Image (spheres, rainbow, N blue to C red):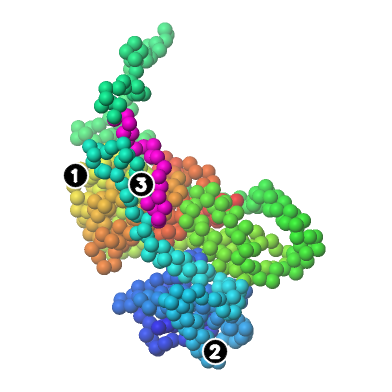
Amino acid sequence: MLEQLLIFTRGGLILWTYKEIKDALRGSPIDTLIRSCLLEERSGSSSFNYDSPGASYTLRWTFHNDLGLVFVAVYQRILHLLYVDDLLAMVKKEFSQVYDPRWTVYDEFGETFKQLRIEAEARAEELRMSKQSGKPVANGPKQGQRSKSGTGNGGDAGFSKGKVASDGGDGEGDGRKLENGHANGNHVGAKDSKVNVVVKGKENTGSNNGAFDVSKLQKLRKGGKKTDVPANKAPKGDTKKKITKQNRVWDDKPSETKLDFTDPADANGDGVVNDADVVHGESMMDAEEVISSDDESESEDDEEVAKDKTDNKKKGWFSSMFQSIAGKANLERADLEPALKALKDRLMTKNVAEEIAEKLCESVSASLEGKKLASFTRISSTVQTAMEEALVRILTPRRSIDILRDVHAAKEQHRPYVIVFVGVNGVGKSTNLAKVAYWLLQHKVNVMMAACDTFRSGAVEQLRTHARRLQIPIFEKGYEKDPAVVAKEAIEEAARNGSDVVLVDTAGRMQDNEPLMRALSKLVYLNNPDLVLFVGEALVGNDAVDQLSKFNQKLADLSTSPTPRLIDGILLTKFDTIDDKVGAALSMVYISGAPVMFVGCGQSYTDLKKLNVKSIVKTLLK
């Protein structure tokens, strides 16, 4: 049963709606679709699933880009309605003929919709019956018309793709039959040495180079000579003594002494910090970054002009000139594919994950398909402009990321503001935690560190060194303790001594390490921090998607809370080592929906910046 069909403009004005039962929808699936897909450039997907207490819905949609209209259908997920894509295509075609931008009410469209729905249901039933009988289904005239006009979001492609996957799943067991020889080597003979592999009815009788050679075994049993000599066995005469390299001694140089740069310690064993060793300087978080207003690289413009010239020669001078002046009637997917392919390759060279680049190109294609090309405008420039707008929307935070304001709000509630730093091994969590502490100290905020990395050797000493240099308190309990309990005691201690912020350092862990991920989920659930920061390297490419998605998935699956906490923000490290390979920022934000709140760009405490969205977008499309 179709629950709802909605037609609205890209500006949010609802033009027409159909409801099977009034106020039957639970939750707000349309609003969630707009926030999670349409505004986040995920409109290239074929469907969206929405879960609410007591109901689960599937939403499918299509666009009319030339008129700026969105058509959305909502139905129960358990029903698997096969006619929804056809119905959306027919509604799109009929409504576009009666649409007038000056009108806001289309009550008379209800009768047209009833006829379209009956026709779509009849065609779906006919398709189902023909599939059961095994007869091929001939494409009707309306299907041919619909395939030419296009649905905008590739909904039919998504349906056929799912059908192929299901058909392949039925015959999946056929390709797993293996007819092997005897497993026990004692019963292997010369006749049984051949291994037959049957895959989908085809027999592979080729010799396996890595298999055991029975003829060699028979020669050894007969007392034949052993001809093979191991490659790693050297002759006896070649053995030499290992000679250690001696340091060169210069005539005028005094004897070499071991240098010790360790800070002097007092009676308690704590290092003594001189006033000259305390870090000074302003953090780059508060500095305004200046972006150069250079245009796009001239070489790429020249390449595009050259491509256009060759295309113009192929098309003919008059036709190309007429098209550039009059503009193309409607952009089709075939027109967009060359520009989108070049844009996808460019994003991947900037370290954007392949999956993310492909989804972005699909979303841009869905937003441009059917749109009229303006006069004196190239398709490549139109695609690039659409991609630039999409990237700005993705990287711009959807909520406030003003940590200082949140710290003061928590201070008014007489409690400390808690930030937990999580991430994989070796990305620089402790170092960047110290950078954040230094930035907070510059804004007159009382900071305390919590050494909750009780797993890695030297982690507590490393954080103690940072605390000593920054002259801030640190809460530690040593090693092999429960990090969740250590963090809880640190927060209680901060509330007693009046600290405004608690920075919790955690152990690095791979996203597949379930025991450590379970411990992290317990720490987040027990202490309920104000901010969970994922610390990730700017050097990663495709692995960024795997890391963030699995961190979020583990935090959700292993939590005992009905509303588990996920990652709230991202801290990108080693940003000064990547040149123009800034794609990891886009991949992380796209897959998690969390904003990039800090960017580490050096090894000193002042090397912490904000993410400049315009600069990142310009670099990605350069």
Instruction: Kindly identify the amino acid type of the residue bearing the numbered disc 2.
Output: Thr
Q: Does the magenta stretch include residue 212?
A: yes
Provide the residue span drawn in magenta.
198-217
Numbered label tally = 3
At mark 3, the secondary structure is strand
121 vs 144, left or right, is: left
Res 82 visible: no
The amino acid beneath tag 3 is Asn
10 Å crowding of disc 2: few (<14), some (14-19), many (20+): few
Residue linked to disc 1? 480
**Which mark sits nearer the N-terminus, 1 or 2?**
2
Residue pointed to by mark 2: 112
- Extreme right residue here? 318
Residue receiving disc 3:
196
- Residue 316 drawn at (x, y percent): 78, 60
Mark 1 surroundings within 10 Å by alpha-carbon count, few (fewer than 14), some (14 through 19), many (20 or more): few
